[in-house]
Amino acid sequence: RRVLFRSGLAPATCAMGPNEELTTVRFPHLLCSGGEWRALLPLGVLAAAGYGVLVLAVQYAIALRIIGSLAASGCTDPGPWYFAVRDYRPAELVFGCALLTRDLALNLVPTFIAGDGAWQSLLLSYASLGHAAAVLSLEPFVDNANQTMEWLSAGAVFAILNLAGALG
């Protein structure tokens, strides 16, 4: 998921190169004012926005259909769309949307705050902290081992990025 989204936003991330010209971060040979860049920028932004918005909208639509089926059946039948979220607890169908929202934040922050590493680290650390809090409060996984591993790793990422952001 992240690779596709980050690839779409690659033309939008420009920084000053060693030759004092504004180039894209991911493709240093591509000048941010050239004709190739002007052709790639709308396509990249459209691809990233389409992927981010479309996938998130599909996840929310699936969650709403499952909730509707559960409401209509008195919480006994999740309906035909249950295959999309069967690895999570039935009461926590929105966790897939929470993961996509976190991935969106992890990709948008470096794109739009490309020059300031300290702010990137701090904002990304709080996105990881939010993910750890969501895992702790929602308990989305059926088995405890995955749940513990998920919130511990998100908490560790929070601590590392917060320290890196504080150090500047």
Image (cartoon, grey):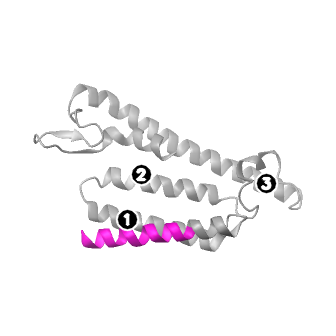
Three-letter code for the amino acid on which mark 3 is drawn: Gly
Q: Quadrant of residue 20?
A: top left
- The residue most toward the left is 20
Alpha-carbon distance for marks 3 and 2?
32 Å
Mark drawn on residue 67? none
The vertical placement of 57 against 168, above or below, is above
Which mark is nearer the camera, 3 or 2? 2
Q: Please indicate whether residue 101 sits to the left or right of residue 124 in the image.
A: right
The structure residue drawn at horizontal position 24% and vertical position 32%, both measured from the top left corner, is 30
From the viewer's perspective, tell me whether residue 83 is left or right of residue 149: right
Q: Which residue is mark 3?
A: 68
| Residue closer to the observer: 13 or 161 | 161
- Quarter of the picture containing the C terminus is bottom left
Which amino acid is tagged 2? Asn
Q: CA distance from mark 3 to mark 1?
A: 35 Å
Q: Which residues are magenta?
A: 151-168
Mark positioned earlier in the residue sequence (3 or 1): 3
Q: Which residue is mark 2?
A: 107
Up-down relation of residue 127 to residue 2 (above or below): below
The structure residue drawn at horizontal position 81% and vertical position 45%, both measured from the top left corner, is: 80
What residue is at 34 percent from the left and 53 percent from the top?
Answer: 110
Callout 1 amino acid: Leu
Query: Residue 31 in the image: x percent, y percent?
Result: 21, 34
Residue bearing mark 1: 123
Q: Residue 57 location, x and y as percent?
A: 60, 46
Gap in angstroms between the C-alphas marked 2 and 1: 11 Å
